[in-house]
Image: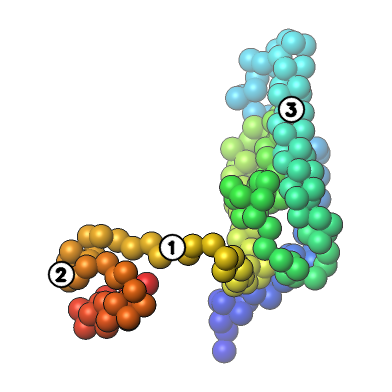
Amino acid sequence: MFSFRSFGKRAGAFLFRARSYTPIPLVLCILLLPYRCSFWKPALDNVAGIVAIIITGFVIVVAGEVLRVVSVAYSSPSTRTRRVGASRLFSSGPYAYVRNPLYIGNTIILIGMLVMSWAGFPWLWAISFVLCLTQYFLIVSVEEDIFAVPVNIHRTNIVWYNPAVFEEIGADPPTTFDEFFTVAEEFEKAGIIPW
């Protein structure tokens, strides 16, 4: 029986292993397709416009590569492997802001290449982004696992709660573990999943 979930996992695993090569067809399209877009036409009527477009695209490519280099510096070479999974959860540097900065860097590089090559064809931009997003969606679905983040026991731990939900069931926030479990039972009776 066909299952989209298992197909997605198999496709994601294949794309993960081939991720170094998947941009090649797009790069060839970008470099080999003739210029036909009227969007860039005014800028391309003079040499200064051409230079400005190339410099703009190059700056975008460099920005994407800088994001990639910084990300690898924080994650170590463990991201450059054919094996799915990481030895640990990275949460500093770019990883403190976004889960997959390497893929965002790759997407930024793609945008820079599209600009540099004057690939203003609307359909090429659309195809590039759909393929890029599809590839990374499938890869991330294979890569992501549940990670446990160690809790420093020597520190005070805090349980966050929503005061409005407590008001809804008429309970006070717990201050002890016994109260915690009592309030949890009240939540369950009210049909609310506690914590």
- Of badges 1 and 2, the one in the foreground is 1
In the displayed structure, does residue 96 sit left or right of residue 192? right
- Please give the residue where the numbered disc 2 appears in the rendered image: 170
Question: Which residue is painted at 22% across and 68% down in the image?
Answer: 172
Give how far across and how far down residue 38 sits, in percent. 61, 24
The quadrant where residue 64 appears: top right
Mark 3 secondary-structure assignment:
helix
Mark 2 secondary-structure assignment:
loop
Residue nearer the viewer, 60 or 3:
60
Q: Are marks 3 and 1 in contact (CB under 8 Å)?
A: no
- Please give the residue where the numbered disc 1 appears in the rendered image: 158
**Callout 2 crowding tier (Cα within 10 Å): few <14, some 14–19, many ≥20:** few
In the displayed structure, does residue 188 sit left or right of residue 124? left
- Of badges 3 and 1, the one in the foreground is 1
The amino acid type found where label 1 is placed reads Ile
Give how far across and how far down residue 193 sits, in percent. 32, 76
In the displayed structure, does residue 156 sit left or right of residue 60? left
Q: Are marks 1 and 2 in contact (CB under 8 Å)?
A: no
Give how far across and how far down residue 131 sits, in percent. 65, 54
The quadrant where residue 10 appears: bottom right
The amino acid type found where label 3 is placed reads Val
**In the rendered structure, which disc, 1 or 2, sits on the residue that comes first in sequence?**
1
The answer to whether 66 is drawn above or below residue 89 in the figure is above
- Please give the residue where the numbered disc 3 appears in the rendered image: 59
The quadrant where residue 195 appears: bottom left
